[in-house]
Structure formats: structure tokens, C-alpha cells
Image (spheres, helix red, strand yellow):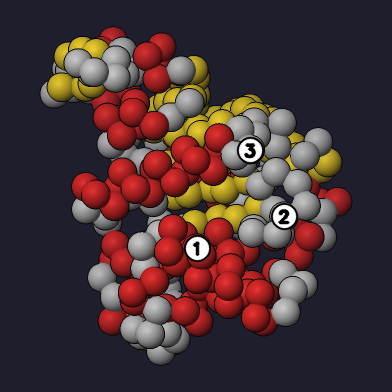
Amino acid sequence: MSIEIKHASLSMGNKVLLDDVSVRFNSGELTIILGPNGTGKSSLLRLLSREWPCNGELKFYDKPAPEWKPKTLAQSVGILPQSSSLTFGFTVREVVELGGLALSVPQREINNIATANMTQTDVLHLEDRLYPSLSGGEKQRVHLARVLTQVSRAARSTVLMLDEPTSALDIGHQHKTLRLAKQLANEGSAVIAVIHDLNLASQYADRVIMLNNGKIVADGAPEAVLTSTNIEAVYGWPVQVIPHPEQNYPVILA
């Protein structure tokens, strides 16, 4: 177990965002969180990442979150937010190398780590471009490279939290990003991703968690969670679910 949260609830005004949620995430597993808009997916990530205070119990590697020093935890836990407010005229390489601030290694090594991660996320050819000039999808991939740089020298299995990492990407980069997430999970990371595309979740997830009205309504393998009954009940739209003709994962047809 890499991260666990128990009895987490969150409200804003009269809106209940999370309602007594308890869940644990394991190393070596790509978990994708699904659910309608406003149902608590990003809110859950904000509690897990400690961006928002948690009124439940939060542990990293079986140790309560308050007992961790932020810099120590940052070497093993990386967060990719939905969007970034970064507007400074940094180059792409400078943004990626910001991830090296958590590392105690020479600058030359940070340069090499950043180059490797920019290659993985297909932004190396943009390294001299100014960050504000990039498209939304390019910015997402730059920040993914930054997060990978941050956790590149972790002393334990890493936790990666990715909030809508494919939302601005074209189809090729969507699949490349989730293939990379799957590879990182296979190498031992606990990868937690929020996405909206049910078919991408079905194809890549080891585990799917479905949220609705702030509660976990289904949790398991894609074929167990992504049924026509569950999808219609949660999203309010009828679908047909059929097996992929070659790879056999569930394919959802509206």
C-alpha cells in the first residue's frame, strides 16, 4: 500500500463533494477515477495530495501524512494538476528542471534527468520554446515531464497523481501518456489518474473507481465496473458495452 485515506468528507457551502470516502492505492497499479462532472474526482486528488486539508485519516506508506516533511514526501509523490497558472517566460527545459528542486543531485544530473523525461513525454523538441507560447496539450506534457523529474530519484515506490492528464491531448498523445502511466505502474509506481474517457480507462486501467455524488459506487477491474448498468445509473445515459475484437477489454458505445 502506498497511500490510504479513511473517512474523508468535504463540503463547500451546501454542496457535498465527498461523503465518507475510504480508499487505498497500491504500488504497481494504475487506478483510474471516473465519474460525472462535479462528483468529487478532483476533490479527492486534492485531499490525497494535501492541497486541501483532510478531515479524515491520510497515510503515505503506512505513515500518517502530518509526520512527513514536505521535501521528503515530494521526492516520492508527484502531482500533475488539471491546469497551471505559470505565466513566467521560462523555457520548456527550465520548467521541467523545476522538478529537480526536490533532488539533492548536481545540476548536470538534473539536466540529464530532464532530457530523458522530455523525451518520454515527447516535448524535447520544444525545450527552447517559451512555456507561455505552448498549446494546452504541450503544456500538459511539459508538466508531466516536470513531475517525472521530481520523483526520479525516489528511495521508495513513487505515487503519481494525474488530474485529467489527457484532457487537452490529441489521440496519439492520449495513448502515449496513458501507455507511459501503465509502464510506470508496471515498474512499481502507484499511479492515480482522473480522466473522463471511459474507453481510455477501460483500455489502460488495472483498477477503476467510479464516483457519484461524492461516494464510491464501484471499485474493481474495468470489466467489473464498466457495465452498461453502472454507466447508465451514474451518467444518466444508455450505453452498450461490447468486448474489443482483438484485446477483449470493454468498449463503451453510446
Element on which disc 2 rests:
loop
Q: Position of residue 239 (x, y in %)?
A: 17, 17
What amino acid is at disc 3? Gly
Q: Which mark is residue 188?
A: 3
Q: Position of residue 62 (x, y in %)?
A: 81, 36
**Alpha-carbon neighbours of circle 2 within 10 Å: few (<14), some, or many (≥20)?**
some
Q: In the rendered structure, which disc, 3 or 2, sits on the residue that comes first in sequence?
A: 2
**Alpha-carbon neighbours of circle 1 within 10 Å: few (<14), some, or many (≥20)?**
many
What amino acid is at disc 2? Ala
Relative to 176, say whether 214 is above or below.
Answer: above
Q: Is residue 245 left or right of residue 112?
A: left
Question: Which quarter of the figure has residue 68?
Answer: bottom right
Task: Kindly report the distance in space between the C-alpha atoms of the residues bearing marks 3 and 2.
Answer: 12 Å
**Alpha-carbon neighbours of circle 3 within 10 Å: few (<14), some, or many (≥20)?**
some
Q: Position of residue 95 (x, y in %)?
A: 49, 77
Disc 1 to disc 3: CB gap under 8 Å: no
Question: Is residue 164 visible to us here?
Answer: no
- The residue beneath circle 2 is 154
What amino acid is at disc 1? Asn
Q: Is residue 223 left or right of residue 56?
A: left
Q: In the rendered structure, which disc, 1 or 3, sits on the residue that comes first in sequence?
A: 1
Element on which disc 1 rests:
helix
Image quarter hosting the C terminus: top left
- The residue beneath circle 1 is 117
Disc 1 to disc 2: CB gap under 8 Å: no
Q: In the rendered structure, which disc, 1 or 2, sits on the residue that comes first in sequence?
A: 1
Nearest to the observer: residue 62 or residue 23:
62
Question: Which quarter of the figure has residue 41?
Answer: top left
Residue at 72% x, 55% y is: 154
Task: Kindly report the distance in space between the C-alpha atoms of the residues bearing marks 1 and 3.
Answer: 17 Å
Relative to 164, say whether 196 is above or below.
Answer: above
Relative to 211, say whether 106 is above or below.
Answer: below
